[in-house]
Image: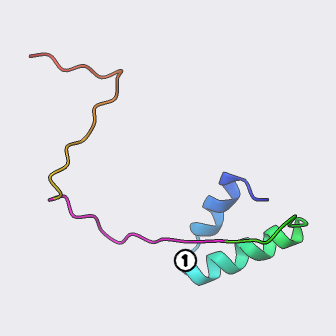
Amino acid sequence: MLEDEQLNRYCGCRRGPQAWVDQMVAEANRRGGLDNITAIVIRIDSVESDTGEHPVMPAAVSQRS
């Protein structure tokens, strides 16, 4: 019931994850939510770079040796 732009706007406020979910569900209901409404917000505070994974280079970027 909500577009990506609207989701970004809700998640951009400083009120926190619970407020984000409350606002998203209220807005989806206001728009006539056609079914049960579920919202999950995951906040990642940091990412460890020592995972052993290597970044994937986009196809448009080539490396010269």
The answer to whether residue 36 is left or right of residue 19 is: right
What residue sits right under mark 1 in the picture?
Answer: 14
Confirm whether the magenta stretch covers residue 43: yes
Q: Position of residue 14 (x, y in %)?
A: 54, 77
Instruction: Residue at 63% x, 82% y: name it.
Output: 19
Badge 1 crowding class, 10 Å Cα cut-off, few under 14, some 14 to 19, many 20 or more, is few
Q: Residue at x 91, y 66 (%)?
A: 32
Q: Residue 59, how many percent across, how many down?
A: 34, 23
Residue 18 in view of the camera: yes
- Which range is magenta? 39-50
Q: Residue drawn 88% across and 71% down?
A: 30
Query: Main structural element of the magenta stretch: helix, strand or loop?
Result: loop
| Number of numbered markers | 1
Give the quarter of the figure containing the N terminus. bottom right
Furthest-right residue in this view: 32
What's under tag 1, amino acid-wise? Arg
Q: Position of residue 53 (x, y in %)?
A: 20, 49
Q: Residue furthest front?
A: 35
Position of 8 relative to 57 (above/below): below
Is residue 41 shown in magenta?
Answer: yes
Residue 36 sits in which quadrant?
A: bottom right
Determine the secondary structure under disc 1: loop
Q: Residue drawn 30% across and 68% down?
A: 46
Q: Is residue 33 above or below residue 58?
A: below
Relative to 60, residue 10 above or below: below
Would residue 37 appear left or right of 5 to someone viewing this image?
Answer: right
- Image quarter (top left, top right, bottom left or bottom right) of the C terminus: top left
User: Colour scheme in the image?
Assistant: rainbow
Residue 15 seen in render: no
Q: Is residue 28 left or right of residue 4?
A: right
